[in-house]
């Protein structure tokens, strides 16, 4: 097959027939002729073609067939854009032509599908293409990381959205490539995928805790807070961030998220940090307000740990001998009661 010509007036039925002819695998479909013969039999009024003598689109086609198919797909889409317009475009579902074409592609056509991804005209179409590529991941695993690093936000977000069926370790490892993408929205979407595997998360998310974007920092902190199987390593990353001078300047909501994430991990290092912050000695007028704020944040973290030792720490902080401010004592009382009540409901001792 040397060339294809699309004439004005081509319709969906003819395009589907063309896709069936050019994308089918003659080795897997017994009884089929070569592509030129099948195209002649299809008798497509608005699609012309030229072919070299003796050419067959089967095993004799060689390695160039994937590139040829990709070029056909690009030219067909360009023709649709120029002459058909939005007649096949749907707001909530991908175009039926695209769906039919993807179903015809063989398992080894992952690179072809990835090449078509930039042509997706809406989120639904891009997601469908991305799902088709990841369904053929073994054939395009070499190209995927580069597209995650350098693709547009729309392209990469489609790929990340299609990763759910992958096993958590593979999903997490693949999503790490998106952290080199310059689009903040891409990194934000990649964080929960990386967190699917604790070992990958602690290896990857550390730098995101100090990102320029507040949303990225918060998402990374929450993701690491869920890495219970790597609690000490995750806690070390969070603690390193909390001990930076810049952390004192972020708003209280963000600080609370970090304290709670640290407490949720239940690590020894995290518990000692929270205990030290809660039991800091009382201050005089200067710095008193700031000290109380830090103590209340520590209460949030200890409450999140919800363990026997955290309940005990919260109860001991209520003792008059500790001389904590009334607001801190009240917060400790409420948090200790919450921890004990939750343990009682769960049949545990706290």
Image (cartoon, grey):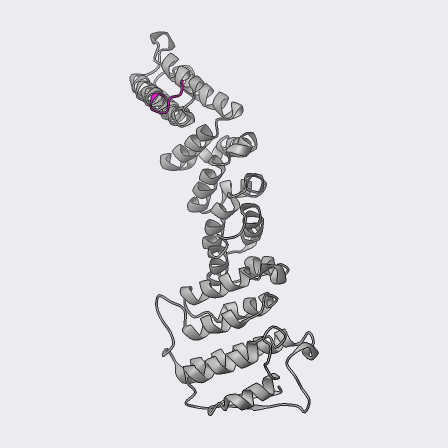
Q: Position of residue 309 (x, y in %)?
A: 44, 17
Give the extent of the magenta segment: 344-350
Q: Measuring 45% from the left and 62% from the top, which residue is drawn there?
A: 127
Judge whether residue 43 can be spotted in this image. yes
Q: Measuring 41% from the left and 31% from the top, which residue is drawn there?
A: 260
Say which quarter of the image contains residue 291: top left
Q: Main secondary structure of the magenta part?
A: loop
Magenta highlight on residue 87: no
Judge whether residue 287 can be spotted in this image. no
Q: Measuring 48% from the left and 82% from the top, which residue is drawn there?
A: 17
Q: Residue furthest front?
A: 31
Q: Is residue 97 left or right of residue 342?
A: right
Q: Measuring 41% from the left and 65% from the top, which residue is drawn there?
A: 124
Q: Position of residue 243 (x, y in %)?
A: 50, 30
- The quadrant of the image that shows the C terminus is top left
Q: Position of residue 106 (x, y in %)?
A: 58, 69
Report the front residue among 121 and 275.
121
Say which quarter of the image contains residue 330: top left
**Relative to residue 308, is residue 241 depicted above or below?**
below
Q: Position of residue 293 (x, y in %)?
A: 36, 26
Q: Is residue 81 left or right of residue 324?
A: right
Q: Is residue 139 left or right of residue 211?
A: right
Report the front residue among 78 and 38.
38
- The quadrant of the image that shows the N terminus is bottom right
**Relative to residue 159, is residue 25 depicted above or below?**
below
Q: Residue furthest top?
A: 321
């Amino acid at each position: 097959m040397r060339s294809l010509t699309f004439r004005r007036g081509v319709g969906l039925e003819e395009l589907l027939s063309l896709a069936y002819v050019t994308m089918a695998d003659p080795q897997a479909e017994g009884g089929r002729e070569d592509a030129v013969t099948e195209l002649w039999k299809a008798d497509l009024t608005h699609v012309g073609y030229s072919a070299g003598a003796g050419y067959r689109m089967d095993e004799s086609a060689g390695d160039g067939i994937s590139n040829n198919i990709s070029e056909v797909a690009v030219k067909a889409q360009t023709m649709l854009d120029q002459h058909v317009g939005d007649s096949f475009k749907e707001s909530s579902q991908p175009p039926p032509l695209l769906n039919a074409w993807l179903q015809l592609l063989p398992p080894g056509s992952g690179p072809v599908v990835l090449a078509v991804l930039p042509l997706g005209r809406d989120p639904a179409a891009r997601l469908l293409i991305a799902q088709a590529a990841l369904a053929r991941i073994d054939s395009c695993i070499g190209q995927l990381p580069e597209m995650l690093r350098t693709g547009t936000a729309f392209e990469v977000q489609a790929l990340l959205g299609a990763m759910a069926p992958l096993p958590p370790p593979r999903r997490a490892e693949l999503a790490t490539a998106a952290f080199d993408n310059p689009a903040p929205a891409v990194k934000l979407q990649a964080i929960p995928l990386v967190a699917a595997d604790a070992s990958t998360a602690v290896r990857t998310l550390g730098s995101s805790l100090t990102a320029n974007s507040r949303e990225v920092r918060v998402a990374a902190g929450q993701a690491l807070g869920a890495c219970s199987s790597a609690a000490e390593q995750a806690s070390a990353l969070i603690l390193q961030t909390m001990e930076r001078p810049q952390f004192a300047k972020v708003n209280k909501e963000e600080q609370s998220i970090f304290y709670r994430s640290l407490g949720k991990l239940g690590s020894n290092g995290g518990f000692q940090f929270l205990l030290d912050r809660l039991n800091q000695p009382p201050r005089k007028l200067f710095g008193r307000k700031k000290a109380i704020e830090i103590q209340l944040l520590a209460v949030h973290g200890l409450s999140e740990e919800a363990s026997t030792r955290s309940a005990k720490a919260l109860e001991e902080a209520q003792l008059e001998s500790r001389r904590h401010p009334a607001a801190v004592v009240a917060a400790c009382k409420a948090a200790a009661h919450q921890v004990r009540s939750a343990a009682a409901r769960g049949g545990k001792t706290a």
